[in-house]
Amino acid sequence: MAEQDQDQKTELPTGKRLEEATEKGQFAKSPELTVVMTLGAALGAMAFTLSDSAQALAEYAVTMFTNFPRETVDRDTVPLLMVEAIKLVGSTAMPVILSCAGAAMLAGGLQSGFQLSPKAITLKLESLNPVAGFKRLFSKATLVRSGLDILKLIAISYALYRGAVSLLQDPLFTAPVEAAYLGTFLSEASSAFFGRLLLFLGLIAAVSYSWEKFKTSKELMMTRQEVKDEHKNAEGDQKVKSAMRRMARRLMQKQMLAAVPTADLIVTNPTHFAVALKYERGIDKAPVILAKGENRFAQRIKALAAEHGVPTVENKPVARLLFAMGKVGDSIPAELYQAVAEILAVVYRTHRYYFHQLKTRRLAGAGSDRANVAA
């Protein structure tokens, strides 16, 4: 029973699972929704531009038929007339085309969460498997899709039927009317037809998208074992990152210990903190922190300093502030300039022989560094 529970997909998909599915193009997508939004955008664009477009077309037709007897049709005039006609048709149709393109992209973005699906365009060998294709042909999803297609056919047929019934009741077919009424009749008839069609397709799109959402959610459900494995992988990644941070910290400590012998002095707490400082006139604008540590690492800094004769000064508040506010490789905080200057002045007076040796030590260290770079 426990093994069966582990194999059943009872867990909601994790964020990583959803992200991977989106990259593969596995998300709820309904072509009916795209059709509805595109049709709605087209009708909206036509509602705003139809009057101006009709007036422009009428003026163009009047001009053409008025000037037609006086126009000369030859190789020079035909291209000009064609260009004018193309410009007129383009300016009339362009708002509708742009609206439809924008609506189609918006529909795709809403369904995908405006995320790219680069893996969706890769070739999938399983899609070429005839056995899998035969199973998909008689699957539950195919039956639902067939039902939606039948609903679309019924919706279009009903819209056409209602449109035909209303058209036959129009005075155009029962009484004499003015010629200008024909334009009004066509506008009202097309608006009524497309309005009904948009309403019915909208209902079908809602059903279709709800079904796709439900189907995709079921497909992305995970077993308990899959959730556990994903958590283990995530923990493994965290362990790798922790190991990398530990290695970086050890490398940093190694570099700090290597710089201690070239320090001007060590400021200690005396037991909890130790900070190594360097100041070279003409090079450093202010004393620079070469190394800092607390507890055991502070003891290592002090031991190494004692081994190389680096002066050590006990100053609890300055050591504590240098450790808390200072950064290795940077100058000391401006707030500590005065305090550190006073400490350095005392050290320079009492350890002159050390600083005479320090110059030679730094030159030797710089020479070895240049040799390592050259090698």
Image: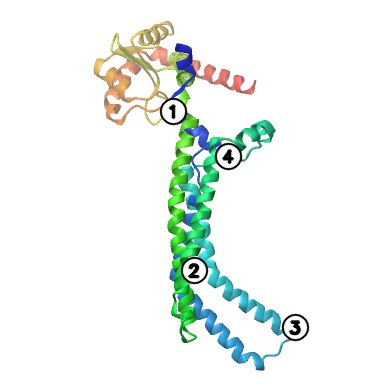
Q: Amino acid at mark 1?
A: Thr
Q: Which residue is mark 4?
A: 118
Vertical comparison of 320 with 206: above or below: above
Confirm or deny contact between disc 3 and disc 2 (CB under 8 A): no
Image quarter (top left, top right, bottom left or bottom right) of the N terminus: top left
Nearest-to-viewer mark from 4 and 2 = 2
Earlier residue among tags 3 and 1? 1
Confirm or deny contact between disc 4 and disc 2 (CB under 8 A): no
Q: Which residue, as the protein is rendered here, is positioned at the far bottom?
A: 70
User: How dense is the environment of label 3, judged by Cα within 10 Å: few (below 14), some, or many (20 and up)?
Assistant: few
Q: Is residue 95 visible?
A: yes
Q: Amino acid at mark 3?
A: Arg
Image quarter (top left, top right, bottom left or bottom right) of the C terminus: top right
Q: Which residue is mark 3?
A: 75
- Identified at 34% across, 26% down, the residue is 332
Q: Amino acid at mark 4?
A: Pro
Q: Which residue is mark 2?
A: 164
Which of these two is toward me, 42 or 122? 42
Q: Amino acid at mark 2?
A: Ala
